[in-house]
Image (cartoon, helix red, strand yellow):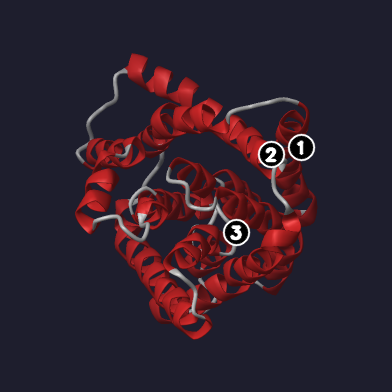
Amino acid sequence: MILTEIINVILPVFILLGIGFFVGKFMTINSKPVSDLCIYVFSPALFFHSVTTSSLDLGDLGKIVLFAILLFVIFALLIKLLGIIFRWNLSYENTMMLASAFPNTGNYGLPIVFFAFGDEGMAIAIIYVVMQSLLMNSAGVFYASNHEKTPKKDIFITIIRMPGFIAIMIGLFMKIANVAVPEAIGNASGLLGQAAVPVLLTLLGITLASIQIKTVLKFIGTAAILKLIAFPAIGFLLLAFLYPGGSLESKVLLISAATPAAATTTLLAIKFDMNPDMVSSAMFVSTLASIITIPVLLMIL
């Protein structure tokens, strides 16, 4: 049953990727304006609408925030260590972070959590989704824009000016302060947000159409192993310290952490010219491989 539901979640992803791939092969499409439209309009609207309409349980906030931050920091240190061992340059190291450090907890992870753990599991997962969105729009922007000669001050300014970061912070403030969103704004952000996922996945397909897989094969394999095995393994160890064994929180957070690479990282890679072909290829392969890894993890749990 779970396997069927997972396939039903993944199959639409590959249909939209396939449409984008077909368009990219047979039409001349400039992906930059489409990417900018997602970054500046569709994605911020999706983040804002998701945060303000979610059933965030502030009582569970502390541990989940701690888990998300610790997992990200430990994984970043692992990538830094691997970069030293294998002598990766800064661009390669940052690209690896984009391709493996940000799980697709939203449009991929939430349906799986719902099918496996119901509404109670969803309440936990939504907090993690918000945290991952915040990390992606801050740390993700840092790694995407951190080129060799970019001053760190400029990177910080870039982060706080990103519409996605601003939208999440406003949404969180309104949610915590219990400020109601005007109906017109809520409806508008909802409509714009609905466009984010299909446009983004189609854009990924267009990007994949121009990739020479042989040139990035080693990177893709490394990123997929790091994202689908190393990242959730670190998460498992952290959860053993934070929650009782077999608790619902630990199961939901582990499944969420084990999801494939987030598609939004490709938008950042395109915008800041941080090897978008490598990032999108790794996202595609990790999503494909997760058809096996996620059901296996669910059976273990």
Residue name at image x 74 percent, y 56 percent: 213
Give yes or no for contact between labels 1 and 2 (Cβ–Cβ under 8 Å): yes
Mark identifier at residue 151:
none
Which quadrant of the structure image shows residue 183? top left
Residue closer to the observer: 54 or 185: 185
Q: Amino acid at mark 2?
A: Gly
Q: What residue is at 37 percent from the left and 71 percent from the top?
A: 73
Residue drawn 26% across and 39% down? 161
From the top left corner, tell me how far across and down residue 38 is, in percent.
Answer: 48, 31
Q: Which residue corresponds to mark 2? A: 205
Q: Position of residue 86 (x, y in %)?
A: 53, 81
Disc 3: which residue: 259
Report the number of numbered marks. 3
Ranked by sequence position, the earlier of labels 1 and 2 is 1
Specify the quadrant of the image occupied by residue 170: top left
User: Is 211 above or below relative to 289?
Assistant: above
Where residue 14 appears, as percent x and y from the top left, is 74, 42
Few, some or many residues within 10 Å of mark 3 (<14, 14–19, 20+): many
Callout 2 crowding tier (Cα within 10 Å): few <14, some 14–19, many ≥20 = many
On-image quarter of the C terminus: bottom right
Q: Quadrant of residue 209?
A: top right
- Vertical placement of residue 138 versus 197, above or below: below
Type of the residue with mark 1: Gly
130, 61: nearer the viewer: 130
Q: CA distance from mark 3 to mark 1?
A: 20 Å
Q: Is residue 236 above or below residue 150?
A: below
Q: Which residue is mark 1?
A: 18
